[in-house]
Structure formats: C-alpha cells, structure tokens
Amino acid sequence: MTDKSDIRIEADRLRRLFEARGAEVFETDILQPAGALLDLYGEDIRARAFVTQDPLQGEMMLRPDFTLPLVQRHMSARLGEGRYTYAGEVFRRQEDAPDRASEYLQVGFELFDGALGSDADAEVFAAFYETLAPLGLRAAMGDIGLLRAAVEGLVSNPARKAALLHHLWRPRRFRALLNRFRSSDQRELPTETKGIEIGLRSRAEVNARLAAMAAEQAETPLDTEAATLIDALLAVREKAPDALSQLRYLAVDMPAIAPAVDTLAARFEAMSARGVDVDTLDFEASYGRTSLEYYDGFVFGFYAEGRADLPPVATGGRYDALTRAIGGNAGVPAVGGVIRPGLVIELGGASCR
Amino acid sequence: MSLKLGVPSKGRLMEKTFAWFQDHGVTLSRVGNDREYAGHVSGVDGVELVLLAAAEIPRELAAGRIHLGVTGIDMVREKLAFWENRVAEIEPLGFGEADLVIAVPDFWADVTTLDDLDQTATAFRATHGHRLRIATKYHRLIRDFLRENGVSDYQLVDSQGATEGTVKNLTAEAIADITSTGATLTANHLRILEDGLVLSSLAVLYKTRAEVWDDAARVSWDALKAQIGLG
C-alpha cells in the first residue's frame, strides 16, 4: 500500500508540471450540490458518487470529479482561452468493483477555448504523454466525432437521427435502434388512448408520440448499406496510421465522415509536431463510447501493460457538449484529462527514471 | 453461541414463516404481549428467534449478527452488493411470491416496452424541463436494470410506501414496485411494461457467509437441518 503522503507529494509535483505549461490552479469544495451533477449525468451518477444530506443545503455529493465546478467557474466568469490544473481527492462508489479505491487523488489539466481544435487536442494529449513517458504506458484513443458524422450523413430522417445521436454513448441501445430502423416495423399501433388520464404527462403528449410512431412506420427502412458502413466504422481498431488509412478508405463510401477524418489527420499531425510518436498509438473507433457521456470528440487513455487489474492511469478527451449542457447553448470548446498520482507511484513513479 | 434465526417481525411474511416451520416440526412463537418483539423456538435445541423488519434481515445476515434469516430475494439483491459472497440461499420457502416490475399509466397507449419508455423519457425531459421520475424503494435494482437496458433521461424518486399512488399525486410519472397479483396497479390505473419484469422474488431461507460459526451454532444448525428435512 502506497503511503498517502507520498501520493500527495506526487500529486503536487504533477500539478506543478501542468502549472509550468501555463495552467492556473483551480480549487473547489469537496461537498458539491447534487442537483447540477444529477441534471448533467443523470441517475447513473448516484451509482458512482456518494450522496449525503445537508439539513439546510439539501442533497450534496462528495466531489466525483472537478469537471463540472471548473466548467461552471470558467463559463460564469466569461473568460477567453484558459488553462487550468487541480489536484485533490475525488470519491467514487465501487459497488461492482470492491477492489478499486473509492477515494483517490486526481490531478487534472484542462484547456478551454483553444484557438484551433486539433492543436488544443494535441497540446493536452502531449502534456499527458510527456508527463507519463517514464512509465512506458500504452496509449489508446478514439474519436466519437466519426460516429456522429456517420450518423448525421447516413440517416436522413430527423427523428431517427436524433434518437441515434442521443444514444451514441450506449452501444446496446444504439445497436437496437439501428436494427429497428433497418427492419420495417409492423407493430399495430393503437389509434386512441383509453383509460383515465393521470400524472404530468398529458394525453396530448401520448397522442403526439403515437402520431410520430405512425410516421416512423411509414418511413422506408434505413438502407442496409448505411448500417453496414456504421458497423465497419465501429470495427476500426489499429495503430494510428493504419486506422487513418482505413478511415480514408471508408470515407470513399461514406463521404459524410471525410471532414471528421480530416480533423483526425490534422490532430495526428499536430501531435507529431509536438513530439508525440503517433505511429505507436492505438486508435479504436469505438473507444470511449461506454465511459462518460459528453466526451464528444477526441478521447484518450493511458494504460499499464499487463496490469489489467488497474484502472487507466490517465484519461481525457474533448467535452464541448458538456459545456453546452451546463451553459445553455453557449458552450465553449473544452478538452482535458486527469492523472491518478496513486497509480503513477504504484507503477514506479514518473520522476526518477 | 446459540444459532440465531431472523424472521420478519410482522404481517403475512411472519405468519407464513411461522407456518412453514410448523409444517417442518419447529414451532416459532412470539412471547409476551403483541407489541413485544421477543420470540421462542421449540422442537429443536439451541436456536434463538430474532424478530426483525424484513428489510433489515439482509444487513443483519451480512454482518453475521444472525446465522439464518428469512426474507425476500428482492430485499437481499437490493440491499447487498455481491450478495452471493455474503449470504447463501438455503431453501425457497414457497410463499412471498412477488414480481418487481416497472409500470406506467395505463392510458399511455404509446408505451408498452422499455424502448418506448426510453424514447418517452427523452421527449418528456424536453417538454417538462426535468427528467421522467420513477418512484421506487428498489434504487439499486432499478438503476442497474435500466442501465442494462439503455434507458436514459429518467430519475428515481424515493417512495417507501403507497408507491402506486405517486403518479396520481404528481410526484412521479412511472413506478417500480413489487406486485403479486397486479390488482393494486390496475386499481391505480397503471400497467406493467411487457419487458418490465426486473426480478421474480420469493421468500427464501438464507445463511450468512460471515465468519461467525462456532461449534455450538454448527451443532444447532445440523439439528435444525435434520428436523426440517434439509440435506
């Protein structure tokens, strides 16, 4: 068991490295109001965070991450470009993984309003890449933007498109939707709603959805080609340069993803320019889909090879959508990530080799 | 230490448990007046009756404060993470059958499946500005079930009783609760989703896996097993 004071020293060291990259130190309370977190992450956050009750302030959560308070702070101050770092405890319930820590230190580096998206992505990735280089970790990345572009380009019906985009982060439901849109739905729909109207949801809402369902049934099924292309996209899993050529090849049949592939290529170039050896990185098109919703572009993680028992040492990505969810429609481009200093020490430390 | 047997302290679950043990040659009884939660066991030696709320029996078993306990499958799975590691199912008792289900207002003609519920929740949030509320006391089981089935944009609201009335009272849009005949749901204008069965529950005799078994407890357990005809 690593000594907690050693972990704190390591966390401070990592934070200073991010400060040296121009980041301002961010501090926030451990007790956070539950309402905003619930609104943002939904009911699942209750399974992952510790909820407690304050007799005056109501339901509070032990800080599950720094992201929400940091975005709130940045957006309420209406700041322009900003770099932030923080180091502190976060708390996660581990109902399904009793061996994992429910309290640990996290050191973050976040960049808001970077001038050019691909360069901001590369700056953040390079910061983690260089900081963690002594540990010899495996880096993996993905880009939810590719799947989003494919759905937007291949699915013309607005209701279907909205449903698929809503479930980009839930692979099972996404798959079920694709299958449903692919086959013709012969289910007999009721034409009227019987029974007593109770609750907030009105009969008018029920009738409106029945009409929408009838319209969906009248639609022609999603063409098989489109679904096959989406499957092919999700199956891409190669070293970065090979992944890029596969995606370029797919873009011939799926021109809609071409801009997203260009974005990816520009990001790889920006990463190379910052000294990242892109050829050694793993790229998986479906990477990051099951983790946090709101990562909506570049996603990455650093893993200790041969230590499947450990969670990732660092994770991060772009979360523009999260800033929009918090700030109404006026979001800010945001990309960042976190390191777990406790794991850095367990793996031998990132400073002394 | 004597063998401690935890039994629900009131209601049909208590009566049926007493009857089941009676049929198997062990007499459980409450002693003192009606309000006193003390019990007595005859027909086997060294067994102590502990009367508890059914919902507390899983916790007491996991902590090893009782060796055996009678409670519903629903209670154990809701209250104990990794329940298999903490208690063992000894014998289903053949009563207390009930299903944990998700139900919506019957007049929601457009919602018959979880898939419909998910789509409805998304639209509801856009229209009403908050997530569709599901009233329940089974928070863990329902959250896991809905996550497993990809339902989003809902929130759970706590309801420890009269859950079927929450929709009419405008404190929830749907409910997740235990039902045996469905009559209470129907009476409250609610309908179970076609794929809304979360768990089929039953009263079960559980044994703790906590390290609390001394020789005396083991001897009494063997005697009890022989008496009630368990292998």
Image (tube, coloured by chain):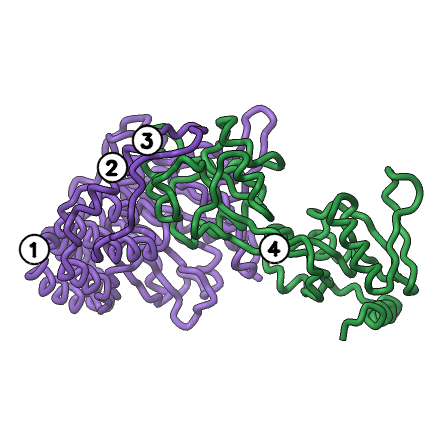
Chain colours: A purple, B green
Label 4 belongs to which residue?
Answer: B201
Q: Where does the image place residue A86, in percent across and percent down from the top left?
A: 41, 42
Asked if badge 2 and badge 1 are on a common chain, one would say: yes
Amino acid found under the numbered disc labelled 2: Ala
Mark 4 and mark 2: Cα distance apart in space? 38 Å
Q: Nearer the viewer, mark 4 or mark 2?
A: 2
- Give the alpha-carbon distance from disc 3 to disc 4, as whole Å: 34 Å
Kindly report which numbered mark, 4 or 1, lies closer to the viewer in this rendering. Answer: 4
* Tag 4: amino acid: Ser
Sequence-wise first label, 3 or 2: 3
Q: Which residue was labeled with disc 1?
A: A255
Please tell me in which quadrant of the rendered image residue A307 appears.
bottom left
**Separation of residues labelled 2 and 1 (CA atoms):** 33 Å
Instruction: Name the secondary structure under disc 1.
Output: helix
**Closer to the observer: label 1 or label 3?**
3
Return the residue at label 2.
Answer: A211
Decide if residue B179 is in sight here: yes
Q: CA distance from mark 1 to mark 3?
A: 37 Å
Q: Position of residue A223 (x, y in %)?
A: 14, 57
Q: Position of residue A318 (x, y in %)?
A: 27, 47
- Quarter of the rendering occupied by the C terminus of chain A: bottom left
Dot 4 and dot 2 within a common chain: no
Residue at mark 3 to residue at mark 2: CA–CA distance: 10 Å
Q: Amino acid at mark 3?
A: Glu
Task: Tell which of B178 and A244 is nearer to you.
Answer: B178
Query: In terms of secondary structure, where does tag 4 sit?
Result: strand
**Looking at the image, is mark 3 or mark 2 nearer the viewer?**
2
* Residue under pointer 3: A205
Instruction: State which chain disc 1 sits on.
Output: A
Residue at x-position 86% and y-position 70%: B223
Q: What's the CA distance linking mark 4 and mark 1? A: 52 Å
